[in-house]
Amino acid sequence: MPEISRLSGNRDWIDLDFVERERTPELAMKIGIQSHVAGLSLSNTVGLLDSLGVQRSKKAIHDWVQKADLQPESGRSPNQIALDETVIRINDEQFWLYAAADPQTNQLLHVRLFSTTTTALTEIFLRELQQKHDVETAVFLVDGAQHLQTALQRAGLRFQMRRHGNRNAVERIFRELKRRTSSFSNCFSHVEPETAEKWLQSFARWHNAPN
Protein backbone atom coordinates (compact mmCIF):
# COMPACT_ATOMS: atom_id res chain seq x y z
CA MET A 1 0.00 0.00 0.00
CA PRO A 2 2.15 2.91 -1.23
CA GLU A 3 -0.36 5.51 0.05
CA ILE A 4 0.33 4.49 3.64
CA SER A 5 4.09 4.83 3.30
CA ARG A 6 3.70 8.50 2.40
CA LEU A 7 2.17 9.40 5.76
CA SER A 8 4.71 11.21 7.92
CA GLY A 9 5.85 10.57 11.47
CA ASN A 10 8.23 8.19 13.20
CA ARG A 11 6.49 4.99 14.32
CA ASP A 12 9.43 2.95 15.59
CA TRP A 13 8.17 3.50 19.14
CA ILE A 14 5.13 1.32 18.44
CA ASP A 15 5.90 -2.29 19.35
CA LEU A 16 3.64 -4.84 17.68
CA ASP A 17 4.93 -7.88 19.57
CA PHE A 18 1.38 -8.48 20.77
CA VAL A 19 0.32 -9.37 17.21
CA GLU A 20 -0.20 -13.08 16.62
CA ARG A 21 -2.56 -13.71 13.72
CA GLU A 22 -3.55 -10.27 12.47
CA ARG A 23 -4.66 -9.82 8.88
CA THR A 24 -4.04 -6.06 8.97
CA PRO A 25 -0.68 -4.90 7.53
CA GLU A 26 1.62 -3.82 10.35
CA LEU A 27 2.15 -0.36 8.87
CA ALA A 28 -1.61 0.20 8.81
CA MET A 29 -1.84 -0.90 12.44
CA LYS A 30 0.91 1.52 13.42
CA ILE A 31 -0.83 4.36 11.59
CA GLY A 32 -4.08 3.51 13.37
CA ILE A 33 -2.41 3.44 16.78
CA GLN A 34 -0.40 6.59 16.11
CA SER A 35 -3.41 8.53 14.83
CA HIS A 36 -5.71 7.64 17.71
CA VAL A 37 -3.06 8.20 20.39
CA ALA A 38 -2.24 11.58 18.82
CA GLY A 39 -5.82 12.69 19.38
CA LEU A 40 -7.84 11.46 16.39
CA SER A 41 -11.17 9.98 17.46
CA LEU A 42 -11.83 6.32 16.78
CA SER A 43 -14.41 7.24 14.13
CA ASN A 44 -11.96 9.52 12.33
CA THR A 45 -9.21 6.92 12.60
CA VAL A 46 -11.53 4.38 10.96
CA GLY A 47 -12.11 6.92 8.18
CA LEU A 48 -8.38 7.51 7.75
CA LEU A 49 -7.62 3.82 7.38
CA ASP A 50 -10.59 3.40 5.06
CA SER A 51 -9.18 6.12 2.80
CA LEU A 52 -6.01 4.03 2.61
CA GLY A 53 -7.91 0.92 1.62
CA VAL A 54 -7.95 -0.70 5.06
CA GLN A 55 -11.37 -1.43 6.56
CA ARG A 56 -11.27 -1.92 10.30
CA SER A 57 -13.77 -1.25 13.08
CA LYS A 58 -13.48 1.18 15.97
CA LYS A 59 -13.21 -1.80 18.32
CA ALA A 60 -10.27 -3.20 16.36
CA ILE A 61 -8.34 0.08 16.61
CA HIS A 62 -9.25 0.43 20.28
CA ASP A 63 -7.94 -3.10 20.90
CA TRP A 64 -4.67 -2.35 19.10
CA VAL A 65 -3.98 0.60 21.40
CA GLN A 66 -4.87 -1.37 24.52
CA LYS A 67 -2.85 -4.47 23.59
CA ALA A 68 0.21 -2.47 22.56
CA ASP A 69 0.51 -1.40 26.23
CA LEU A 70 2.66 1.62 25.37
CA GLN A 71 4.33 3.53 28.20
CA PRO A 72 7.18 6.03 28.59
CA GLU A 73 10.57 4.34 28.37
CA SER A 74 12.43 3.69 31.62
CA GLY A 75 16.02 4.43 32.62
CA ARG A 76 16.13 8.23 32.65
CA SER A 77 18.29 10.26 35.06
CA PRO A 78 16.78 13.75 35.11
CA ASN A 79 18.24 16.63 37.11
CA GLN A 80 14.82 18.12 37.71
CA ILE A 81 11.31 16.67 37.65
CA ALA A 82 8.13 18.69 37.31
CA LEU A 83 5.40 16.95 39.30
CA ASP A 84 1.75 17.86 38.94
CA GLU A 85 -1.80 16.56 38.59
CA THR A 86 -4.89 17.52 36.64
CA VAL A 87 -8.53 16.46 36.42
CA ILE A 88 -9.73 14.07 33.72
CA ARG A 89 -13.41 13.20 33.43
CA ILE A 90 -14.50 9.63 32.71
CA ASN A 91 -18.20 8.90 32.30
CA ASP A 92 -18.94 12.21 34.04
CA GLU A 93 -16.84 11.20 37.04
CA GLN A 94 -13.73 13.05 38.14
CA PHE A 95 -10.34 11.33 38.12
CA TRP A 96 -6.87 12.69 38.74
CA LEU A 97 -4.06 12.33 36.24
CA TYR A 98 -0.65 12.38 37.93
CA ALA A 99 2.34 13.19 35.73
CA ALA A 100 6.08 13.62 36.14
CA ALA A 101 8.03 15.36 33.38
CA ASP A 102 11.64 16.25 32.70
CA PRO A 103 11.57 20.02 32.06
CA GLN A 104 14.89 19.91 30.22
CA THR A 105 13.65 17.47 27.57
CA ASN A 106 9.89 18.12 27.92
CA GLN A 107 9.39 14.36 28.10
CA LEU A 108 6.93 12.56 30.33
CA LEU A 109 8.57 10.15 32.76
CA HIS A 110 5.49 8.55 34.30
CA VAL A 111 1.71 8.98 34.26
CA ARG A 112 -1.03 7.38 36.34
CA LEU A 113 -4.75 7.85 36.78
CA PHE A 114 -6.32 7.79 40.25
CA SER A 115 -9.88 8.22 41.48
CA THR A 116 -8.80 10.87 43.97
CA THR A 117 -5.71 12.73 45.10
CA THR A 118 -4.11 11.91 48.46
CA THR A 119 -0.70 11.68 50.06
CA ALA A 120 -0.86 7.86 50.00
CA LEU A 121 -1.60 7.76 46.27
CA THR A 122 1.17 10.27 45.62
CA GLU A 123 3.55 7.94 47.48
CA ILE A 124 2.48 5.07 45.22
CA PHE A 125 3.14 7.23 42.18
CA LEU A 126 6.58 8.20 43.47
CA ARG A 127 7.54 4.59 44.22
CA GLU A 128 6.63 3.60 40.68
CA LEU A 129 8.62 6.56 39.35
CA GLN A 130 11.64 5.46 41.41
CA GLN A 131 11.36 1.95 39.99
CA LYS A 132 11.39 3.30 36.43
CA HIS A 133 14.01 6.03 36.66
CA ASP A 134 17.04 7.22 38.64
CA VAL A 135 15.46 10.11 40.54
CA GLU A 136 17.27 9.98 43.89
CA THR A 137 19.36 13.10 43.18
CA ALA A 138 16.74 14.95 41.16
CA VAL A 139 14.98 18.06 42.44
CA PHE A 140 11.20 17.87 42.17
CA LEU A 141 9.41 21.06 41.19
CA VAL A 142 5.96 21.30 42.76
CA ASP A 143 3.30 23.88 43.46
CA GLY A 144 1.79 24.52 46.87
CA ALA A 145 -0.13 21.21 47.08
CA GLN A 146 0.62 19.88 50.56
CA HIS A 147 0.05 16.20 49.73
CA LEU A 148 2.74 16.37 47.02
CA GLN A 149 5.23 17.92 49.41
CA THR A 150 4.42 15.47 52.22
CA ALA A 151 4.81 12.45 49.94
CA LEU A 152 8.17 13.73 48.67
CA GLN A 153 9.38 14.31 52.22
CA ARG A 154 8.38 10.78 53.25
CA ALA A 155 10.21 9.37 50.23
CA GLY A 156 13.34 11.33 51.10
CA LEU A 157 13.27 13.19 47.79
CA ARG A 158 14.32 16.80 47.35
CA PHE A 159 11.83 19.36 46.12
CA GLN A 160 11.32 23.06 45.53
CA MET A 161 8.11 25.02 45.41
CA ARG A 162 7.91 26.72 42.05
CA ARG A 163 4.87 28.08 40.27
CA HIS A 164 6.60 29.20 37.09
CA GLY A 165 9.74 28.47 35.10
CA ASN A 166 10.67 24.82 34.59
CA ARG A 167 7.61 23.53 36.45
CA ASN A 168 5.51 24.86 33.59
CA ALA A 169 6.76 21.92 31.49
CA VAL A 170 4.18 19.54 32.88
CA GLU A 171 1.45 22.19 32.67
CA ARG A 172 2.24 22.69 28.98
CA ILE A 173 1.94 18.94 28.47
CA PHE A 174 -1.41 18.92 30.27
CA ARG A 175 -2.65 21.70 27.98
CA GLU A 176 -1.50 19.74 24.94
CA LEU A 177 -3.17 16.59 26.26
CA LYS A 178 -6.47 18.38 26.77
CA ARG A 179 -6.24 20.00 23.36
CA ARG A 180 -5.67 16.66 21.68
CA THR A 181 -8.53 15.04 23.56
CA SER A 182 -10.88 17.89 22.70
CA SER A 183 -12.44 15.67 20.03
CA PHE A 184 -13.55 13.48 22.95
CA SER A 185 -14.95 16.59 24.72
CA ASN A 186 -12.06 16.10 27.15
CA CYS A 187 -14.16 13.34 28.68
CA PHE A 188 -13.72 9.62 28.09
CA SER A 189 -17.21 8.23 27.60
CA HIS A 190 -18.30 4.62 27.99
CA VAL A 191 -14.85 3.37 29.01
CA GLU A 192 -13.39 1.92 32.17
CA PRO A 193 -10.77 3.98 34.05
CA GLU A 194 -8.14 1.32 33.26
CA THR A 195 -8.84 1.77 29.55
CA ALA A 196 -8.50 5.54 29.81
CA GLU A 197 -5.26 5.16 31.75
CA LYS A 198 -3.76 2.97 29.03
CA TRP A 199 -4.66 5.57 26.42
CA LEU A 200 -3.04 8.30 28.54
CA GLN A 201 0.12 6.22 28.97
CA SER A 202 0.15 5.59 25.23
CA PHE A 203 -0.18 9.33 24.68
CA ALA A 204 2.87 9.82 26.91
CA ARG A 205 4.86 7.36 24.79
CA TRP A 206 3.77 9.15 21.61
CA HIS A 207 4.57 12.54 23.14
CA ASN A 208 8.14 11.42 23.90
CA ALA A 209 8.73 9.83 20.49
CA PRO A 210 11.00 11.59 17.97
CA ASN A 211 9.25 13.04 14.94
Image (cartoon, rainbow, N blue to C red):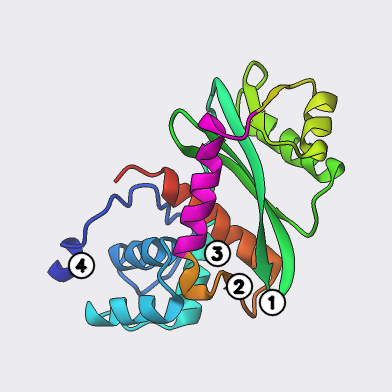
The disc, 4 or 3, on the residue closer to the chain's N-terminal end is 4
Q: Amino acid at mark 1?
A: Asn
The tag on residue 181 is none
Q: Residue furthest top?
A: 137
Q: Nearer the viewer, mark 4 or mark 2?
A: 2
The N terminus - image quarter? bottom left
Q: Looking at the picture, which amino acid does disc 2 mark?
A: Phe
Please check the rendered image and state whether residue 68 is part of the magenta-colored stretch, yes or no.
no
Q: What's the CA distance linking mark 4 and mark 3?
A: 22 Å
Q: Earlier in the sequence, mark 1 or mark 4?
A: 4
Distance CA(mark 2)–CA(mark 3): 15 Å
What residue appears at the point 55 percent right and 64 percent down from the top-left corner? 66
Q: Nearer the viewer, residue 44 or 152?
A: 152
**Relative to the observer, which residue lies in front, 63 or 78?**
78
SS state under label 4: helix
Q: Residue at x 84, y 47 (%)?
A: 118
Q: Which residue is mark 4?
A: 4
Q: Which residue is mark 1?
A: 91
Label 2, on which residue?
188
Q: Is residue 16 above or below residue 71?
A: below
* Span colored in magenta: 162-180
Q: Residues under labels 1 and 2: Cα distance?
A: 6 Å
> Which numbered disc, 1 or 3, marks the residue that appears first in the sequence?
3
